[in-house]
Image: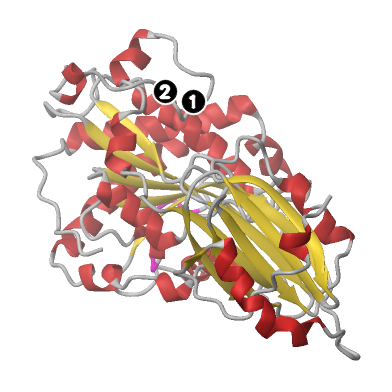
Amino acid sequence: MLEQTEFGTEPPTAVNTASHLTRRNLLKFAGASLALLVSPVGFAATSLLAVRVWPANDYTRITLEGSHQLKFTHLLVKDPERLVVDLEDVQLDSVLQTLPSKVLDSDPYIRLIRAGQNRPGVVRIVIELKNEIAPQVFTLQPVGDYGHRLVLDLYPTEPADPLLALIEKSSPLDAAAGEPTTSDPSSPQPVRESVAQGTPRRKGGPAANRLVTIALDPGHGGEDPGAVGRRGSYEKNVTLSIARRLKRKIDAEPNMRAMLTRDGDYFVPLGQRVTRARRVQSDLFVSIHADAFVRPEARGSSVFVLSERGASSSAARWLAQKENDADLIGGVNLAKQEGHLARTLLDLSQTATINDSLKLGKAVLTELGDINTLHKAQVEQAGFAVLKAPDIPSILVETAFISNPEEEQRLNDDAYQDKMAEAIMRGLRSYFKDNPPAGRTKVAQLD
């Protein structure tokens, strides 16, 4: 049963997103809000098209999609911790009533969600929280298959340290020895001190007396499904599965470890993917995708690196634009974006990094050619936003065309996914054999 105090007598009229208002504060607004209790005449209700909840360790996203732009107010309430959102010109319909069922018990931030008719034309959503949060609330204009969206991003007040999180991942020595880990391949056991101090290498591995870190970037995720195959396969699911397989192979090397820019079905902005790789001082960055084209006969694997001088082909330019649109599809809070990438691109190390990226791309492309047709026989270049780390050799691997029915079927096959991961792994070994990692000389962090 809905609480009267939350859904009927405390309509907020002024919102300060940085404020933490108590129940007593809310009551102060009640007298000034009596006029709003009068039923509006002839308002045009906005219909809700969908509600979605995307939980992750980094943050949880709630998306409300409407036929028109949603009018809203919101505030934080303490004791207990809650986020209250009032939607104007909206009726409590069957779509909104499904919102409570979208919350998983395992969600790290949300305890439960309740929705009720606060007053005529106003629906109140109360999000009970497990911990104190720092919310980001913003709207998105229609794009792709999405209508008007209201996004509620629930971030922890103290973000996790990505380097500490990586240290707590599984030990490459443990993985190589076959010691048991958790059932989730992306959540193994702590690294032993001996690993961090340097380990012996296997034949073909990096010739460095230190732990080599590789950032693996499963393309798309959450609100952004990526390309969709004829049989309904989502690129975001294929890329995550292949990345997890590749991570296990990298972690099995005694002097290598991998981190995932996302380890679940949630959206990470392109710039944040690069930032996460830099914060853990990655030696390489490998972004994994599954290509798509308007004609189903297009097929084959490709590898791309960043270009500062324009795309190497019109197809590469088209693909870069499509991949860069991921931020529009997934939904980025533009008010919170930093300009550090644009500034760091001025660093003189960018040219050298691109040269190393080309070497890495060639090594991986050669191995991909052993398991699949190559869409292009050479590494291509274009302005991919996700490859713009100024000090990390970076490649984008288009594993196959998910828009090709035959390749879509293969991309969903466990054995083929493992072959794809193994081919990329062989490419990494080949690259390190000819280009052993040197000491770390990283560009200063500006973010």
**Most foreground residue, 54 or 103:** 103
Residue 228 belongs to the span the image colors magenta: no
Q: Which residue is mark 1?
A: 185
Residue 80: x and y in percent read 57, 50
**Numbered disc in front, either 1 or 2:** 2
Is 87 located above or below residue 395 in the figure?
below
Disc number placed over residue 188 in the picture, else none: 2
Disc number placed over residue 236 in the picture, else none: none
Q: Residue at x 36, y 50 (%)?
A: 158
**Quadrant including the C terminus:** bottom left
- Answer whether residue 361 is visible to the viewer in this image: yes
Q: Please say if the residues under marks 1 and 2 sit with CB atoms less than 8 Å apart.
A: yes
Q: Quadrant of residue 412?
A: top right
Q: Quadrant of residue 195?
A: top left
The amino acid type, in three-letter code, at marker 1 is Pro
The amino acid type, in three-letter code, at marker 2 is Pro
The dominant secondary structure in magenta is loop
Magenta residues, start to end: 376-383
Horizontal placement of 200 versus 327: left or right?
A: left
